[in-house]
Image (tube, grey):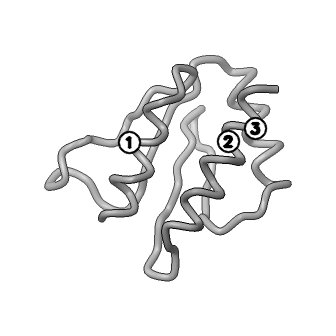
Amino acid sequence: MKLSEWLINNLKEFEELDIITPTERDQRGSIVTVKPKTMTLTQRLATELSKCERPVIYNIRRGLLRFSIHLYNDLDDMEKLVECMENIIKR
């Protein structure tokens, strides 16, 4: 759960994203869900994330971006994901 907490805290820095996952530890699992504030950004993330190094499994459902953090993921994976998202959002 520490990785999901780290990811949530770092994704909060993006004003273009709303965090959907509860921030309270006892109310969340290993899936982190965010909602891009525009459909254009949702589409861009859907297209561009597949081109990044993909250490974290993700999917998009109903305009929500869901990241599935697993036992084999580590902090380096989370950092790469946030860096990739930052690059996509700033374009």
Q: Which residue is mark 3?
A: 87
Q: Earlier in the sequence, mark 3 or mark 1?
A: 1
Crowdedness of circle 3 by 10 Å Cα count: few (<14), some, many (20+)? few
Using the image as rendered, state which of residue 84 and residue 68 is in the foreground: 84
Q: Regarding mark 3 in the picture, which secondary structure is present there?
A: helix
Decide if residue 22 is on the left or right side of residue 55.
left
Cα–Cα gap, marks 2 and 3: 5 Å
Q: Earlier in the sequence, mark 2 or mark 1?
A: 1
Q: Where is residue 79? Give x, y as percent.
A: 58, 57
Residue drawn where x is 49% and y is 67% of the image: 75
Crowdedness of circle 2 by 10 Å Cα count: few (<14), some, many (20+)? some
Q: Which residue is mark 2?
A: 85
Residue drawn where x is 38% and y is 35% of the image: 20
- Badge count: 3
Cα–Cα gap, marks 3 and 1: 18 Å
Q: Is residue 34 above or below residue 6?
A: above
Residue drawn where x is 52% and y is 49% of the image: 66
